[in-house]
Image (cartoon, helix red, strand yellow):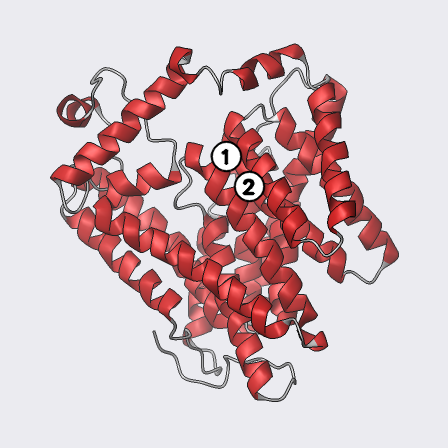
Amino acid sequence: MRDLLLVLIVFGSLPLILKQPYIGVLVWSWISYMNPHKLAWGFAKGFPFAYIVAIVLCFSIVFSRERLRIPRTGLTVLWGIFLFWMCITTLFSIFPEYATDQLIKVLKIQLVTIFTVMLMTSRRKIDLLVWVIVLSIGFYGVKGGIFTLLAGGEARVWGPAGSFIQENNSLALALLMILPLIYYLYLQAKNIWIKRGLLFSMPIVALSIFGSQSRGALIGIVAMGLFMVMKSKQKVLAFMAIIIIGVFGFMFMPQQWHDRMSTIEEYEQDASAMGRINAWKYSINVANDRITGAGFDSWSSLTFAQYAPDPDAVHAAHSIYFGVLADHGWIGLLLWLGILVAAWRSNSWIIRNARDHHQLSWAVNLARMLQVSMISYGSAGAFLSLSYFDLPWHIIAIIVLVKEIVKKTLVSGGKEKEVLSQTRLGV
């Protein structure tokens, strides 16, 4: 039944995608983040739904009558250079076959993210995308939070098998990143029942993060909580809510959770932590030796024998920073960090220029929560290999779009409108 329902939904959306390309971005995002086919039991489990949607989306864009473009900004230019540099590092990678396979996967994600910048050109479309992201990932957050309650915190929360967020650590990071987006939707919602549902979901999702038993997520939730208080209009209320949720989660979780979290202070006695540090030193050494880095998927006994202090402890970096450093060298890391800094500055520009305009209050709220989401990614991601995960790139795309809408709205004297559809396609 699940298989048939999924097929009907996806294939039923294809004519709509051909007519309205932006619907393809929404459907693809739903499949990519929620992985609904992983919840099926039959033929749909391995069916290439995302690939089919992406192909139809490409056709829809090619034959679209809309004049689509990518805004020319410092952020998008850096983004384009980074994509080009990934191709260069793959060309000179240590293991070209593995690196090429990974590059293709990354570019597929990047392509749909670029489509997002081209198509999601209004507040309504952006809000729809945020809803899709929140509901897709939040499904596992609410499910995991309820599971944590029922299990007394004894078992870990995991994501959908075979996805970016399969591991407990990865799911926890994704949930950390959507918590601020849930709050944004709560601020914007008009229906009282929707507001109550969103308000109820936030502590449940937070409990799911505790239930993941991820040490990186614990660091991330502290950083996110503090910054969320700073960005909230009702700082005292936000501080009290975060303290209550934090204390409840801390007291609710069993002793095994506390034992695991305590190893953060005793990392020298933790084999997992020392393995990561060894991989980080490998990343630095390979970047110092090779201007293009090692390329994608270089983590092997051969490369560790040459560059790692401990050649027998072969691990992935488990860090968004050191992962990019190993894959693309110092140039790649600087480009990637430049993108994040440019995105942060764009958010600050939105907040600074739109806060005195009531009709742009939604943009200010969204920019603030996107900054909180970036804090979650930057802090918890320091201990996870999710440099190429869809969500941070989608957040960057949303930042680009919101800034363009704010700029055009201010120029037009305060009238909100679709700001990108009237100009030609360009990079």
The residue under label 1 is 170
At horizontal 60% and vertical 35% (from top left) the residue drawn is 222
* Left or right of 64, for residue 236: right
- Residue 237: x %, y % from top left: 79, 46
* Left or right of 324, for residue 386: right
At horizontal 60% and vertical 40% (from top left) the residue drawn is 175
At horizontal 47% and vertical 78% (from top left) the residue drawn is 64
Q: Is residue 421 above or below residue 137?
A: below
The residue under label 2 is 174
Give the numbered dot on residue 6.
none
At horizontal 68% and vertical 77% (from top left) the residue drawn is 357
Under tag 1, what secondary structure?
helix
Q: Look at the numbered discs 1 and 2 and tell me whether their residues touch, using CB distance below 8 Å.
A: yes
- Residue 278: x %, y % from top left: 28, 23
- How crowded pointer 2 is (Cα within 10 Å; few <14, some 14-19, many 20+) is rated as many
Q: Give the amino acid type for the residue marked by disc 1 in the picture.
A: Ser
